[in-house]
Amino acid sequence: MTGVDELVNHHDLETPDSIQVRFGIDYLDARPADAEAVLSMPMDRFRNPFTGAPTIGPMAILVDAAGGIVNHYRRHTDEWTVSSELSVELSTDDLGDLDGPILATARTLGPRGATSLSICTLTYGGIVIGGGTVRSFFIPAEAVLPQRPPETLQRSDETTLSDLMAVHVQPDAVGHVLAQRADPNLNNDIGIVHGGVAATGLELAASAAVNHGRPDGLLRTASLRVNFLRPFFAGTDARYEGTPLRVGRNTAVGDARAIGDDGKLAITARVTAYR
């Protein structure tokens, strides 16, 4: 029988079971002693709700899960880990409409200090397509396993990325605004929106902003860099706002920010896209 201590060691505060179930994340290999892990997640032809185009945004959920767990393996027994930075970097080649599993092979970089840095390689169809990083810092915590809510979403072949993320486009908003509704299954174990889910929402908003008015030849995200500033609470007023910084014929840079239901700026992101 697996003891409580072992369960806690394998449990990541940032990516609870509810996130793993919602997005189909599987652990293919886990080596806590070496701070290494291999996770997979299906992409399921995910689409940006603003443009209807294929999106790489949900890769941030996998990167956060894989990078977060290997950082978590380095914690002391009285600590948890919380993500402070996340990045996703992809090949500029057209990845097309991804519809299979992505593998994230994660390990830590350098010694542990006040923070832990991890890196993961992203593989699709047996080909390395990019990578990601996660920086986590350590917080005091009791060694207990929190309660997780049962899954409430009834999935079908028609289930969209917006359904999985509990988001919707605000058609009457100025600019590109994606509302983040409350769903306890999307929260981490400290009651805020999972970092990878939030990073995905930011990518969707920023990508839509830089592609505004482009009927074809859409720009595809190659780089996503996220900074987590404070807790992001979902609710009636929670949202992601995308803004273009510079848009050219073949490349663009856009920013996005997550505003919590408490009205506070919680997360920022920068997206670089290419055609």
Image (spheres, rainbow, N blue to C red):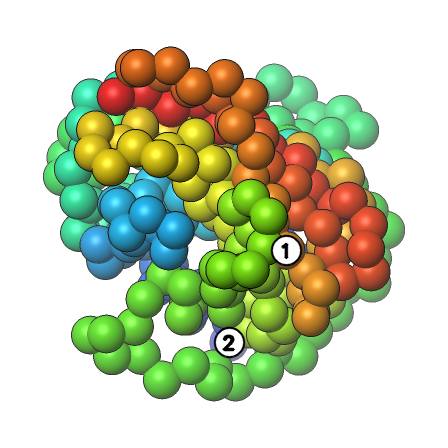
Among numbered discs 1 and 2, the one appearing first in the sequence: 2
User: x%, y% of residue 245?
Assistant: 55, 21
Is the residue 199 above or below the residue 226 in the image? below
Q: Residue at x 75, y 46 (%)?
A: 266
Could one spot residue 130 in this view of the protein?
Answer: no
Determine if residue 154 is in view.
yes
Gap between marks 1 and 2, in whole Å?
43 Å
What residue lies at 19% left-to-right and 45% top-to-bottom? 98
Q: Nearer the viewer, residue 213 or 117?
A: 213
Q: Position of residue 236 (x, y in %)?
A: 69, 70
The residue under the point 54% across, 55% down is: 178
Residue 161, x across and y down, in percent: 36, 61
Q: Nearer the viewer, mark 1 or mark 2?
A: 1
**Amino acid beneath label 2:** Met
Which residue matches tag 2? 1
Secondary structure state at the residue bearing disc 2: loop
Describe residue 36's horizontal placement relative to residue 136 as left or right: left
Quarter where residue 188 is shown: bottom right
Q: How many marks?
A: 2
User: Horizontal and vertical percent for residue 209?
Assistant: 47, 36
The residue under the point 51% across, 76% down is 1
Residue designated by label 1 = 239
Up-down relation of residue 87 to residue 32 (above or below): above
Nearest to the observer: residue 12 or residue 23: 23
Quarter of the image where one finds residue 134: top right
- Extreme-right residue of the structure: 140
| Horizontal arrangement in the rendering, residue 239 relative to residue 203 (left or right) | right
Q: Measured along the vertical axis of the image, is residue 217 above or below residue 183?
A: above
Q: Type of residue at label 1? A: Arg
